[in-house]
Amino acid sequence: MSVLVTGGAGYIGSHMTLALLARGEEVVVVDDLRTGFDWAIPEGVTFARGDIGDVAFLDQVFSAHKPETVLHFAGSIVVPESVADPLRYYANNTVNSRLLIETAVRHEVTHFVFSSTAAVYGMPGDEPVRETADLRPISPYGRSKLMTEMMLEDTAHAHAIRYAALRYFNVAGADPQGRTGQSTKGATHLIKVACETALGLRDHLDIFGSDYPTPDGTAVRDYIHVSDLAAAHLDAIGYLRGGNPSIVCNVGYGRGFSVREVLETVRKVHGQDFDIRTAGRRAGDPAMIVADGSTARQKLGWTPKYDDLPTIVADALRWEDRLRFRNLR
């Protein structure tokens, strides 16, 4: 029995694939390579190139490899873009997820781990945020992910499939061994953009909003190392294989850093200044969101190893160096 990873050639998916291989799993990656990279798929992994919106393609892959577990990373992730083009987000994140879930049920998959997001909370107000907080997403991105959580919940009541929905906070960093990292051109993740600017790959960085009700006026987020996130998925697989019920978990460290604090950390780790400018707020961005990650720690047994902002930044900077010198994009 194999583990099928959608979006396995992308940022988080490629880290997940490495973690699965290290544990001796049989891995099948499904990716259309619109935002992923074929070089990010390591040896020993079966690769099926195609769109998860193509049911005939999915049926062929599931029939050939008979996955026991599906890890679903494929999707669109840029909040302001979702505000500008909501229908594309509902098509890619919600409609395609429904087709994938339906295919998994048809092929008797027993475990499903879903890449959800803290954006399902919207602007919660209370920090840190627990899974029991009201779900009030303020962007089509957040709503599209919440809809998929709802589909999974209803499907698990009706069929013999159990799931874990992991609500990520702000994922950053890169593989500590330098094997993969965030490689998409034009990415909007703060730490990646800051590292690119520090290395001269962008001429400046914009702070989107300096008038939030936070200590320094800039937005506050809980940044999690991508390798710790992959480890949480391994723990979720183990949890489901242990016969436990479906679960929803936050995955974050429980500590927030403002935009200005992140940029100062990049300056210190890199050792040089770079051009920072102030712009208006972006649509769909809350002022602050920090995780209560106790459920993942207590029920999944998740134990983070890289809970340190300078470490996250250092790994991200090393990856950007690798990208520019080896022309991997």
Image (spheres, grey):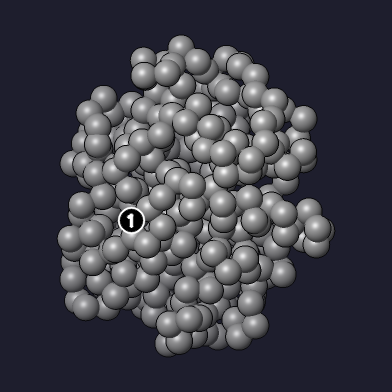
- Disc 1 element: strand
Asked if residue 116 is positioned above or below residue 14 in the image, the reply reads above
Residue 216: percent from left, percent from top: 42, 18
Count of numbered circles on the image: 1
Asked if residue 259 is positioned above or below residue 233 in the image, the reply reads above
Q: Residue at x 36, y 15 (%)?
A: 213
Q: Which residue is mark 1?
A: 165
Q: Residues within 10 Å of mark 1 (few under 14, many from 20)?
A: many
Q: Residue at x 46, y 77 (%)?
A: 20
Looking at the rendering, in which quadrant would you find the C terminus? bottom right
Q: Is residue 241 left or right of 224 when viewed as pictured?
A: left
Q: Residue at x 77, y 38 (%)?
A: 200
Return the residue nearer the eye: 305 or 153.
305
Residue 271: percent from left, percent from top: 64, 40
Residue 240: percent from left, percent from top: 26, 72
Which amino acid type corresponds to the residue marked 1 in the rendered image? Answer: Ala
Return the residue nearer the eye: 76 or 273.
273
